[in-house]
Image (tube, helix red, strand yellow):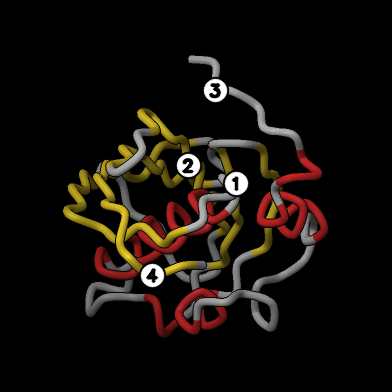
Amino acid sequence: MTLQQPDPASNPGLEYFRSLIGQSFKDKSRSPFGRWLAGTLLAVEHGRLEIEFTVRPEMLNPAKTFHGGVIAGIMDDAIGATIFALGKKNFFTSVNLVVDYFAPAKEGDRVIAKTAIIKEGAKIINAQCEIWHAEKNRLLSRGTTNLMKIDVEV
C-alpha cells in the first residue's frame, strides 16, 4: 500500500517526529503515558512509525511476562503518535482496539512497535500496530484499531 506523501514543510507533526529519531520520548512526548513508556523513536514517515521499548519490572504481569495491558497501551499511544505525524488539524480518538497476543516477552527484553495506517479517511482512520521482539525478530502481538475525528484541534 502506498500512502500519499504530504509536503514535509506543511506538516509540522511529521517534521517534529523526524527531529526526534534516535531519542527517548521520556521527556519529549506530549502524552504523559508515552513519557512513562519511555520508548525511543527509530523511524517515522507518513503513515508509519517505529518505537523501541525496554520491558521494565513495572510493565510485567504476575507471571513476570510483558503485561497485555501495557502492550495494548503501547499500541494505542504509538498509533496516536502516527496519526499526529499525519499532520491532521484535529485529534482522533480510539473507537476500538483489538489485540492478539502471540508470544511473551520478559524483563529486559527490547521490543519494537511498528505502526501502519491502513485506511486514512476524513473522519475515520483504521490503523494497526505490531509488537516485535527486537533480538529474536519474533512477532509478539498485533492490534488493529479504528479512530474517529473529534472536535478538538491539535
Residue at coordinates 28% horizontally, 42% vertically from top-left? 124
Where residue 134 appears, as percent x and y from the top left, is 58, 46
Q: Is residue 15 above or below residue 150?
A: above
Crowdedness of circle 1 by 10 Å Cα count: few (<14), some, many (20+)? many
Where residue 154 appears, as percent x and y from the top left, is 51, 67
In this rendering, does residue 66 appear at all? no
Q: Nearer the viewer, mark 3 or mark 1?
A: 3
Q: What residue is disc 2 on?
A: 115
Amino acid type of the residue that numbered disc 2 sits on in the rendered structure: Thr
Q: Is residue 82 above or below residue 154?
A: above
In the picture as drawn, the residue positioned furthest to the top comes out as 1
Q: With 16 as the anchor, is 108 left or right in this view?
A: left
* Front in this rendered view, residue 117 or 112: 117
Closer to the N terminus: mark 2 or mark 3?
3
Q: CA distance from mark 1 to mark 4?
A: 26 Å
Numbered label attached to residue 3: 3
Q: What residue is disc 4 on?
A: 152
Closer to the N terminus: mark 4 or mark 3?
3
Q: CA distance from mark 4 to mark 3?
A: 25 Å
Numbered label attached to residue 50: 1
Amino acid type of the residue that numbered disc 3 sits on in the rendered structure: Leu
Q: With 117 as the anchor, is 51 left or right in this view?
A: right
Closer to the N terminus: mark 2 or mark 1?
1
Residue at coordinates 65% horizontally, 72% vertically from top-left? 25
Closer to the N terminus: mark 1 or mark 4?
1
Determine which quarter of the picture holds residue 28.
bottom right
Do labels 2 and 1 touch, CB within 8 Å?
A: yes
Q: CA distance from mark 4 to mark 2?
A: 23 Å
